Amino acid sequence: MDAYDVLVAVALLIVAYGLVSGGRIGRYVTGPMVFTAAGAGLAAIGLGGGEGAAATEIANQTMRLLAEFGLAILLFTDAARINPSHLKQEENLPARLLLAGLPGAVLIGFLAAWLLFPGEAWWCLALIALILAPTDAALAQSAIANPQMPETVSQTLNVESGLNDGLVLPPILIVFGIAAGHGTEQGIAATLAGHLILGPLAGAAIGYGGGWLVRRAANRREMTPLFQRLSAPALAVIAYAGAEAIGGNGFIAAFAAGLMMPLTLHTDAPARRLEEFAEAEAGILTSALFLLFGALILPIGVPHWDFATLLYAVLSLTLVRMLPVALSLVGTGLGPGAVGLLAWFGPRGIASVLYLLLAVQALGGAEGGQEALERLTSVVSLTVFISIFLHGLSAAPLAALYLRHKGPRGRRG
């Protein structure tokens, strides 16, 4: 499957699904479901090329650039859409999920992988837990975007999913370095410096400076709305490239650059343009990535699916996610309905797909890497596949059930 095929397929599907996206079908059949199924269908009829061709395609330079720049843009836009004040609202609910629920999910996920996959390399088990920790609120948009949904639920899920992919990135990259054979004390120190110092510094400088320039030009009417929208992916790529040029980590830089946007754009018109980009142009990117997930990643993962993989996928979407979230919300006064909704809506999506692509590209030559990558790919692909359809189909009914039976405390029921 070449870039031309992907572009044509995405264009056709955007128009076809768009025609029904606002009706009854769109409530229960989400865009990610459609694009993933279409990608799997293309692979099934031979356009994906099968397992061997898919593995070759993932390793090529075009796919590498798509994964790297795609992740940088998504990290940037996720961070840019977060209002820092939301972390302090509703008794710090997002902070509880990020600082307690997220580490708890990684720990339980690692223990579950250790029990179900004995003999696998430790770094493979760690990557399974880390890559499947970030959530993707887009897979449950029919619930989160419901105007009747209390902000206690919708804003908390949006903030959590916007930040958790960036928080798990440093440990993922460190595991990459150790697994690839750069695990000396000096190498780890250099990796940490690049990830935790140079990357954030470069990203913050580029994000703040770029955001200030955009706001200044927009306020002087010297920058058109079109280029205000296009400045979002441009700044993400510049932050990524700038950090890489000085030995920092480009992904963390893109995330840090996005965090600077609320400080420079405030709530002015440029901030609204960035929101428009996130809803439109970034939507095209995620649609293409779901198509590629179905066409390239599923053909590699399916032959290695087994009962242990299925059991882990089910645990990842239930116990591994829901128990830490429920524990992190103890003492908040939330009713069981709100806690259950927050715990259940932890779908796995684009961040997990992109981190898996990076793992395949970075660790293909690691010692014992091929077998471990087969396990990693099988677990992540099956978990994401189930999540796309399970969370997509359950979002609207569960939201309606919650709103119908919400307790007398209203927003906190």
Image (cartoon, rainbow, N blue to C red):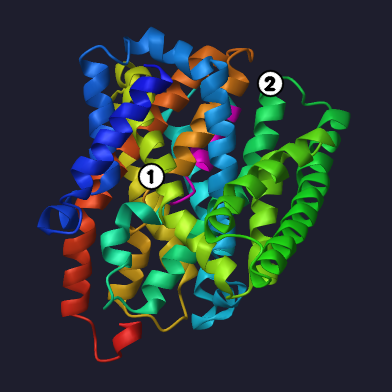
Numbered tag placed on residue 407 in the rendering: none
Residue 83 vertical position relative to residue 46 in the rendered view, above or below: below
The percent position of residue 161, horizontal first and vertical second, equals: 47, 57
Disc 1 marks a residue whose amino acid type is Ser
Toward the top, the furthest residue is 52
Q: Quadrant of the C terminus?
A: bottom left
In the image: residue 194, left or right of residue 168: right
User: Is 227 in front, or is 333?
Assistant: 227
Circle 1 sits in a helix, a strand or a loop, which is it?
Answer: helix
The percent position of residue 198, horizontal first and vertical second, equals: 83, 45
Q: Main secondary structure of the magenta part?
A: helix
User: Is 120 in front, or is 266?
Assistant: 266
The percent position of residue 99, horizontal first and vertical second, equals: 59, 63
Q: Quadrant of the N terminus?
A: top left
Q: Which residue is mark 2?
A: 180
In the image: residue 248, left or right of residue 86: right
Q: Which residue is mark 1?
A: 316
The percent position of residue 137, horizontal first and vertical second, equals: 39, 56
Residue 29 vertical position relative to residue 155 in the rendered view, above or below: above
Q: Is residue 349 visible?
A: no
